[in-house]
Amino acid sequence: MDIMPFLNRDLDVPLYQQLYQFFKENMHEGRIQKGIKLPSKRLLATQLSISQTTVERAYEQLAAEGYIVSKPRSGWFAAYNESDFVHVKMPGTLSNKPKGQENEQSIDFHYGNVDSTHFPFSAWRKSMVSSLGQYGQQLYQPGNILGELELRTLIAEYLYYSRGVHCQPEQIIIGAGSPVLMHILCQVFGPNICIGFEDPGSSRSRRIFEANHMKILPIPVDDEGICIKNLRKERPSLLYVTPSHQFPLGTIMTINRRIQLLKWAAENQSLIIEDDYDGEFRYSGQPIPSLQGLDHHNCVIYMGTFSKSLLPSLRISYMVLPSSLLEKASEITSLYKQTVSCHNQLTLAEFIKKGDWQKHINRMRKLYQKKRAILLEALQSELGEQVRIRGENSGLHILLDVYSPFSEKELIEKAKGEGVKIYPASPFYKNDPPTATVLIGFAGVSEDDIQEGIKKLKAAWEI
């Protein structure tokens, strides 16, 4: 490879991140073509007078994002082909294109992204190696269909201390993402069952229930949570809610509404699916206990995931079932076998046991709290009273009501014209969708790009 990175030790940016950004930019600009062999970690560390660990972290991040691949006994090779993709200007880089061609989607406020640059690859790798040595031949076996007992035991302990969930490891089923577990649940209940669903609510979850021929009953949501009077009227046998951070509104179900909801479920002999998809991230006050932890009638199915707190690509989620559903759920799960690799499960178990999981959560909570503060300050400074912010006290996105003559679609198109990608709120509604409301996620956006992105929104919307 003819080009060599230059690292600036005077910058606040970590060296591994500078190295990662160097290779990423050069692949996007076409200076490093697909198939080119990268320097070995040892050689690059020697040439740049840095540690091999620094190079490893950069290469691991590039590999995680698909920019490079490792070939056994051959080394690392570029895997990114610019011609395969629509050109995207990389955040924080300078473009050589004429000014008229600057409007490219470079700042993506997607509500499902996380900050992967702070993932502790070194600690995760150590846990992987440790699990290989500790569990040996166990890794080559099919594994427990419900999930490895070591991990389910640790999840049960974690949920009790962090979310007040009361369960035994035997009640937990692990799956490769929440959609897989929802499909299992749908088969437990069968088709044609009436399921109450928050309106607005997660469009992906709703589509999964619809694909399994369930009857969706939209239930409105107010400032305290799902409306009990509508539940009493509709009387669904099953109910799906996101009480810790209502999706997409971001509201937190009050303790009074939680108690009312559990009382309704017990009286109606209905079951509640509590999706706690990003319960780790709350920025003001103490966490409100989970519905499952408050439940005395075994009517709550609790769902959680590591996608928001670790990496979505790891695909590790879990659900806690009431004892009444265990036999049927186990029978259906056995048809799938276990959808998460045994090695990944035991690596995560080691990661938790060593304390690296809690350290990572604490770091990410502080990082996201900082990004959230930057976003709120930028919105106040640039857009002021022309917008209303909702759902800012927890989670990784906010909802933004925009007071302007533009429709939701026009707001998104105008933002796109300035190189900013934001997302509509209307797809999450079955009834009465808003006309000018957008979702803005902040977890996967750099602090500088958050500020720059909001400035561009101001210009785009002529506010």
Image (cartoon, rainbow, N blue to C red):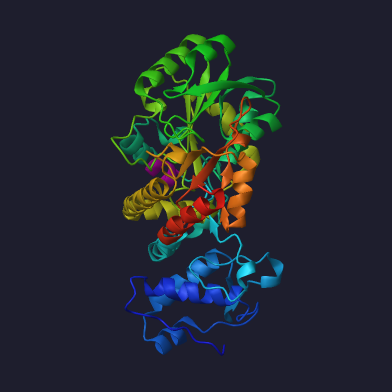
Q: Is residue 21 left or right of residue 193?
A: left
Most common secondary structure along the magenta stretch: helix
Q: Nearer the viewer, residue 213 or 427?
A: 427
Reply above or below: 16 against 342: below
> Residue 28's spot in the image, x, y percent?
60, 73
Q: Does residue 66 belong to the magenta stretch?
A: no
Reply above or below: 202 against 419: above
Q: Residue at x 50, y 43 (%)?
A: 317
Reply above or below: 277 against 68: above
> Residue 211's spot in the image, x, y percent?
70, 32
When asked about the image quadrant of residue 101, the answer is bottom right
Q: Nearer the viewer, residue 325 or 195?
A: 195
Q: Is residue 36 left or right of residue 326?
A: right
> Residue 461's spot in the image, x, y percent?
55, 48
Q: Does residue 151 belong to the magenta stretch?
A: yes
For residue 403, say whether it is visible.
yes
Q: Residue at x 46, y 13 (%)?
A: 264
Q: How many marks?
A: 0
Reply above or below: 308 against 55: above
Q: Which span of residues is magenta-colored?
A: 149-155
For residue 73, say whether it is visible.
no
Quadrant of the rendering where the N terminus is positioned: bottom right
When asked about the image quadrant of residue 191, the answer is top right
> Residue 248's spot in the image, x, y percent?
51, 36
Q: Is residue 203 left or right of residue 261?
A: right
When asked about the image quadrant of residue 356, the answer is bottom left
Q: Nearer the viewer, residue 416 or 6?
A: 416
